[in-house]
Image (spheres, helix red, strand yellow):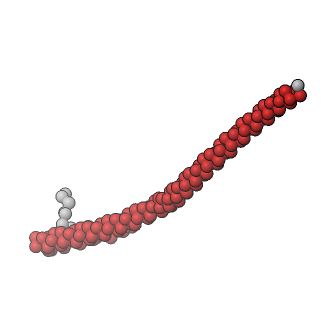
Amino acid sequence: MRPNLFLPRTTTLSSSSSMFDRTEKQKSKQETHILGPQGLESSLHQLLHDHNQTSLKLQQQTEKAKKEALKTAIHVSDLLVETVNGGVQVSFLNEKRIELEIRALAATVLRYTKQTDQWLAASHSINSALKEIGDFENWMKIMDYDCKSINVAIRNIYQA
């Protein structure tokens, strides 16, 4: 026996409803015989129309779900970008602060270096002056000794 493709399908809910399904099938067969070829054609057109309507609804639902998924994905990516950018922004601000502190420290170091150089120059000048004073003192002692020697020699000559 060849299956009849133009008959409406029925689904069985349980084994107790199988009797009901058989009677529905028999009624459908009887209606098919009563309807004739035009009834089959209109049934076929109706099935085709229902299939097209169902396909269109599925396509619309799929498109709607795709759009919602795209919106959700965009929202998630925006949240991720905001999260990452927040960390990057904090890092960038910290980097700027550190650079400003480095510049301030470099200026302070430069100022202290100049001041240290000035102190070294001043201490070198003082050292040179002290050496000169030491040399002068030594010269003075030599001159004093020479003068005393000359004085003793002149006294000796005068007394003699």
Q: Which residue is drawn at 40% across and 64% down?
A: 78
Q: Which residue lies furthest to the top in this view?
A: 160
Q: x, y (%) of residue 94?
A: 52, 59
Q: x, y (%) of residue 115?
A: 61, 51
Q: Can residue 65 be seen in this view?
A: no
Q: Which quadrant, please, contains the N terminus?
A: bottom left
Residue 15 drawn above or below residue 143: below
Q: Can residue 20 be seen in this view?
A: yes
Q: x, y (%) of residue 125?
A: 65, 44
Q: Give whichever of 52, 139 is nearer the camera.
A: 139
Q: In this view, does 105 lie to the left or right of 141?
A: left
Residue 6 drawn above or below residue 102: below
Q: Give whichever of 99, 149 is nearer the camera.
A: 149
Q: Quadrant of residue 158?
A: top right
Q: Residue at x 78, y 31 (%)?
A: 146
Residue 46 drawn above or below residue 137: below
Q: Give whichever of 76, 67 is nearer the camera.
A: 76
Q: Give whichever of 158, 100 is nearer the camera.
A: 158
Q: Residue at x 18, y 66 (%)?
A: 6
Q: x, y (%) of residue 71?
A: 36, 67
